[in-house]
Amino acid sequence: MATEPLPDTAVPRDPGIWQGGWHAHARHVPSPNFGPRPPDTDIDLAIVHSISLPPGVYGGAEVERLFTNTLDWDAHPYFDQIRGAEVSSHFFIRRDGELVQFVSVNDRAWHAGKSSWQGRDNCNDHSVGIELEGLEHHPFEDAQYEALARLLTDLSATWPIRQTVGHEHVAPGRKQDPGNAFEWARLAALTGWQSELLPPLAMPRQGT
């Protein structure tokens, strides 16, 4: 069956959907890992990531604990690799499509790290970070694409989001998520957005 665009993609689904940068339909799990954006910065970029803890394990509370600095570093051997990390994202979309929010869109979350896009460094300054529960190069669920498309629609109706890209595009060679299994064409079809609002669908990857 062909993917149909979501309806009314040019306008918010609910005029009161944003309350101080918090999405009214998300489950709010406030993170302490955020800061102010630089003055007079347009929020014009969305960055799609993938994350699961431990990698490839879904449905647990570990991602939420990581973003709220409550992860038990000794609970799994993998956690030694990220021990002490203080990171966050604005949003997390679980495998069933549930939307979780950690940081107000008005604030700067800590998701992109060292990054650059179209000549601008420090992408955290002007971007919204969206984590999909998953593993790079592994397929995502239908519910996640639908939730992501709706979130991007809601974001772009309030902030001047001009482009959506992957973490791999702003940190090539360092990051690979969401990976080559992510269907950018499908996201374009669901949002009804023109191709220039998304990264080239077959960007070469650098490194591993």
Image: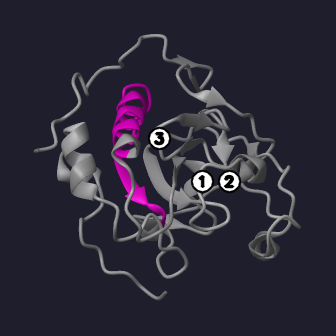
Instruction: Give the mark nearest the N terminus, 3 or 2.
Output: 3
Q: Residue furthest bottom?
A: 207
Nearest to the observer: residue 100 or residue 140: 140
**Res. 52 image quadrant:** bottom right
Please give the label number shown on residue 96.
Answer: 3
Please indicate, yes or no, whether residue 193 appears anywhere in the rendered image. Answer: no
Which residue lies at the image location 19% right of the left edge and 38% below the top edge?
Answer: 192
- Between the C-alphas of marks 3 and 2, the distance is 24 Å
Extent of the magenta region: 145-167
User: Which quarter of the rendering shows the N terminus?
Assistant: top left
The residue where tag 1 is placed is 124
Which residue lies at the image location 76% right of the left edge and 54% below the top edge?
Answer: 66
Please give the label number shown on residue 110.
Answer: 2
Of tags 1 and 2, the one toward the viewer is: 2
- Between the C-alphas of marks 3 and 1, the distance is 27 Å
Amino acid type, mark 2: Trp
Q: Residue furthest left?
A: 2
Nearest to the observer: residue 117 or residue 63: 63
Instruction: Give the mark nearest the N terminus, 1 or 2.
Output: 2
Does residue 85 show up magenta in the picture? no
Does 69 sit left or right of 23 as displayed? right
Does 59 sit left or right of 86 as displayed? left
Percent from the top left, x then y, of residue 181? 34, 67
